[in-house]
Image (cartoon, helix red, strand yellow):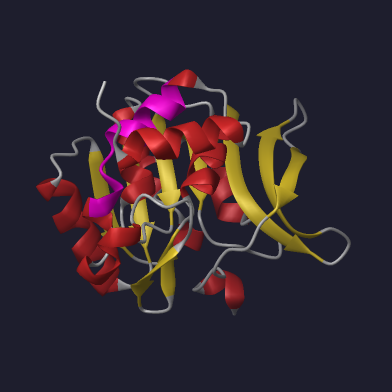
Amino acid sequence: MTDTPAKRLVRQLKADGIEDARVLAAMEAVPRDRFVPVEQRDLAWENTALPIGYRQTISQPGVVAMMTAALDVRPGLKVLEIGTGSGYQAAVLAHLGAEVFTIEYVPELAQRAARDLAAAGVQNVQVRAGDGNLGWPEEAPFDRIIATAVAPRLPPRLLEQLKPDGVLVMPLDQPEFGENLVRVTLGPDGEPRIKRFCPVRFVPFVGSERR
């Protein structure tokens, strides 16, 4: 069987502890090189974050895989993504069968991501330019919400748009814990239950959350 950069990446993700077979298959199938600037394409299949312009990055594949696995995406689920960036994470979610609504604060990146998603043949993704802290209320509630930017607290409007049995995955930067990836579920009382995974580094939330 022919070895490829995608297969080599998946082997590295397995070695790093990613075990979800569906997520690994999506990471192999989605062409990451279609979602990075031309000058970065020789590094597209490396397990590293890459600049995409406007002081933003495409996340490290290992982090994308870890967040996707924590989100527990299944076919037919409605997913809200905050921070479209390159569109790569949205493409992975769509490959897993989700209906994806993704919001990007930088209009130029939103336009580029929509174009690159279409060129890659990715379906079931709607892209909007706007303030991700506000969510997408007309499409709420969502089964899953994923945010690819770090905030000092859980954005309240996103929690309001999460189904009672839903899952939110995002990085949080709190003084007592530092910046960590978290998985959030709502308890029977409606209060968020937070599970911390590991230290991460993400670009910060912009928009109303930072004001």
Point out the stretch of residues depicted in magenta.
22-33
Q: Position of residue 70 (x, y in %)?
A: 59, 33
Judge whether 26 appears above or below 118 on screen.
above
Q: Position of residue 25 (x, y in %)?
A: 37, 25
Name the quadrant containing residue 168.
Answer: top right
Q: Does residue 52 appear left or right of residue 183 in this picture?
A: left
Q: Main secondary structure of the magenta part?
A: helix
Q: Does residue 96 appear left or right of residue 48 in this picture?
A: left
Q: Position of residue 78 (x, y in %)?
A: 39, 31
| Residue 138 can be seen in this image | no
Quarter of the image for the N terminus: give it.
Answer: top left
Residue at image point 59% right, 43% down = 169
Q: Position of residue 33 (x, y in %)?
A: 26, 52
Residue at image point 40% right, 37% down = 8
Q: Does residue 101 appear left or right of residue 158 in this picture?
A: left
Residue at image point 69% right, 45% down = 182
Q: Does residue 201 appear left or right of residue 127 in this picture?
A: right
Name the quadrant containing residue 23.
Answer: top left
Residue 203 covered by magenta stretch: no
Quarter of the image for the C terminus: give it.
Answer: bottom right
Residue 31 covered by magenta stretch: yes
Residue at image point 67% right, 39% down = 183
Name the quadrant containing residue 55.
Answer: bottom left
| Camera-side residue of 112 and 50 | 50
Judge whether 158 appears above or below 185 on screen.
below
| Camera-side residue of 164 and 71 | 71
| Residue 14 can be seen in this image | yes
Q: How many marks?
A: 0
| Camera-side residue of 7 and 138 | 7
